[in-house]
């Protein structure tokens, strides 16, 4: 009795899984030519061979190039040194006002304690947002480098270099003593 019900179940399953000639032809066209593998004959799985390119060496070389481009020789800035930069076309009267703190700082970014890569990203995002909001003057606190030891002020040098590279920065100078002195800069941005 159990054998009869099993055979009936198989027969109904075979009817349900019958494939039409059109479906079979469509399947064979999609699959393409096939070869039958004999019993006991195994095919080795296809593997991707690793690239002959020295990927890690290339990455190291790119990192070195990036560091060389980031470094600006001649930026021997000391802890107490004032920072000052203006693009061509910025009037000296504008720089005097900036230096005196006569422009209202509309935003501030504090980079204290950040590593160089993080500080660079934060500065780029901060300047982009300030430009989008239409800010004209912002303050960036980089610190004086008092805890940097013999290396001197690391972020101070980097911030000065990064600001010179940015097109939206018209000028910058060290802040007044009550706004951070030589540990901060006022940054004048161009209009969006």
Image: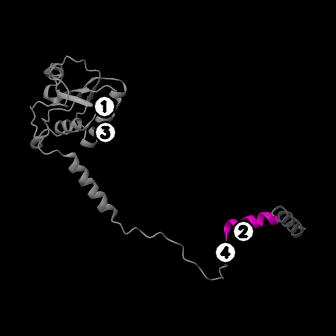
Q: Nearer the viewer, mark 3 or mark 1?
A: 1
Give the residue at mark 1: 127
Whether 100 is drawn above or below 156: the answer is above
- Mark 3 neighbour class, 10 Å CA radius: few under 14, some 14 to 19, many 20 or more: few
Give the residue at mark 4: 34
Q: Which label number is shown at residue 138?
A: none
Going from N to C along the chain, the mark reached first, 3 or 1, is 3
Q: What secondary structure is the stretch in magenta mostly built from?
A: helix
Residue 145 coordinates in the image, percent (x, y): 14, 36
Residue 83 coordinates in the image, percent (x, y): 14, 31
Using the image as rendered, state which of residue 165 and residue 54 is in the foreground.
Answer: 165
Going from N to C along the chain, the mark reached first, 1 or 4, is 4
Quadrant of the snapshot with the C terminus? top left
Total number of numbered discs in the rendering: 4
| Mark-to-mark CA distance, 1 and 4 | 61 Å
Give the residue at mark 2: 28
Judging from the image, what secondary structure is the residue with disc 2 in?
helix
Magenta stretch contains residue 108: no
Q: Which residues are magenta?
A: 19-33
| Mark-to-mark CA distance, 3 and 4 | 55 Å
Give the residue at mark 3: 121
Quadrant of the snapshot with the N terminus? bottom right
Judging from the image, what secondary structure is the residue with disc 1 in?
helix
Return the residue found at the far front. 89
Residue 97 coordinates in the image, percent (x, y): 17, 19
Whether 114 is drawn above or below 68: the answer is above
């Amino acid at each position: 009795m159990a054998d009869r019900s099993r055979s009936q179940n198989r027969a109904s399953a075979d009817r349900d899984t019958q494939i039409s000639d059109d479906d079979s032809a469509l399947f064979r066209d999609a699959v393409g030519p096939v070869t039958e593998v004999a019993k006991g004959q195994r095919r080795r799985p296809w593997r991707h061979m690793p690239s002959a390119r020295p990927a890690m060496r290339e990455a190291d070389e790119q990192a070195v190039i990036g560091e060389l481009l980031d470094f600006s020789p001649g930026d021997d800035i000391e802890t107490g040194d004032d920072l000052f930069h203006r693009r061509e076309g910025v009037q000296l009267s504008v720089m005097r006002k900036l230096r005196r703190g006569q422009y209202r700082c509309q935003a501030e970014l504090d980079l204290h304690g950040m590593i160089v890569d993080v500080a660079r990203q934060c500065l780029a995002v901060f300047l982009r947002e300030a430009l989008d909001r239409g800010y004209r003057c912002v303050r960036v606190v980089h610190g004086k480098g008092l805890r940097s030891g013999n290396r001197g002020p690391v972020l101070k040098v980097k911030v000065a270099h990064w600001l010179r590279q940015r097109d939206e920065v018209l000028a910058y100078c060290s802040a007044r003593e009550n706004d951070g002195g030589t540990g901060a800069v006022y940054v004048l941005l161009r209009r969006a």
